[in-house]
Image (tube, rainbow, N blue to C red):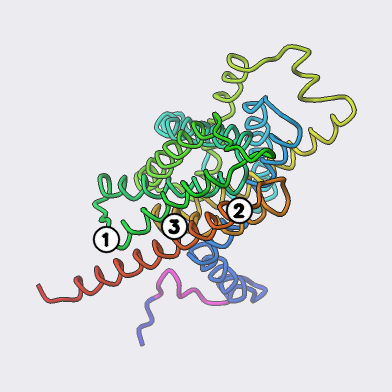
Amino acid sequence: MTSEKTPYAVSQKESSPYGGAPAKRDSGVFWQAIANSGPISILSYCLSSILMTTTNKYVVSGYHFNLNFVLLAVQSIVCILVISTLKFFGVITYRKFNKNEAKKWSPIAFLLVLMIYTSSKALRYLSIPVYTIFKNLTIILIAYGEVIWFGGEVTPMALGSFFLMVFSSVVACFGDKNSEGALNLNIGYVWMFTNCFASASFVLFMRKRIKLTNFKDFDTMYYNNILSIPILLVASILLEDWSPENLNRNFPPDNRLAVISAMIFSGASSVGISYCSGWCIRVTSSTTYSMVGALNKLPIALSGLIFFDAPINFFSVSSIFIGFAAGVLYAVAKQKQKEEQHMKEQLPK
């Protein structure tokens, strides 16, 4: 056995006079494994997505809130305060602000603002089940975006899942009825389609930029939020109604504290979705990230039926399970495609 020391072959004595190095090294390996774990990142993304969707629905719909840019700015500010506090106490770390990197990352921050803004506008008009079913259409856009940008492939089984996704969205439309039984065809569907395009663009651009910059999870989270704040504040001043009447309507004196508390809580929940989105894309892929989003639609949609006054009928319930089946079929299609690619790589050339 060679006596030459590798960077990792450090003696216990050299590492620490108290003999604590092996335990610290084992702990570091454990947390490194967690940070690079696909299943754990996927589970975390699912839970944070459910929390974020239900919280935003509660704020924008429960209080008839129309200052969406203000809400998003509060979410970004709370997110920055949380991670800055964690960095101050040495819990996390991320790279310092760099103007050159910020310039390259700014289009992604703009897409993030557009994605979350259109999401909040869609949630204002649509029920959570309808919103989540239509969100499946984003997967189709991402899949074909990967074909163009990353040399991906759409298999016949994946194409079949896409047809199921579209079908579930059509069924969801028929289930979206008001108290008189009429279809709720409103501006929310326009916001929803805009959100699908914004979400697909955000995921694809971010994956490409992460590969180029080698950003870690908290780097992504920091730049997304710090660059979003000025965009949101300017957009709010230019596009939203800051009249005293509208401010009183959004922050009524009798439940002003409840509205502000809900906004802060939604900001805290945005910390989870902001981190978990970047984490999931980094350790898996943008396609896997979107597929997880599809499978995640079932619990999110059911939470909408349970916690909010969403229409419950044959079409609304059927659309949820058709959408879930489409997500499962898409997952199987991607797994088979991965296995086939692996077998091709094993064949002698």
Question: Of all residues shown, which one is farthest toward the bottom?
Answer: 1
Whole-percent x and y of residue 335?
35, 68
Whole-percent x and y of residue 345?
20, 71
Whole-percent x and y of residue 62?
75, 37
Q: Point out the stretch of residues depicted in magenta.
A: 5-12
Depth-wise, is mark 2 or mark 3 nearer the camera?
2
| Magenta residues, dominant SS class | loop
**Disc 2 target residue:** 301
Image check: 233 left or right of 285? right
Identify which residue, 316 or 35, lies in the foreground: 316
Rounded to the nearest whole Å, what is the CA distance between mark 1 and mark 2?
27 Å
Q: Is mark 2 on a helix, strand or loop?
A: helix
The residue at 40%/48% (across/down) is 214
The reply to whether discs 2 and 3 touch (Cβ–Cβ < 8 Å) is no
**Disc 3 target residue:** 291
Give residue 156's mark.
Answer: 1
Whole-percent x and y of residue 262?
76, 39
User: Disc 1 marks which amino acid?
Assistant: Pro
User: Disc 3 marks which amino acid?
Assistant: Met
Identify which residue, 199 or 225, lies in the foreground: 199
- Within 10 Å of the Cα at label 1, are there few (<14), some (14-19), or many (20+) other Cα atoms? few
Give residue 112's mark.
Answer: none
Residue 125 painted magenta? no
The residue at 39%/32% (across/down) is 104
Identify which residue, 188 or 139, lies in the foreground: 188
Question: Of all residues shown, which one is farthest toward the left?
Answer: 349
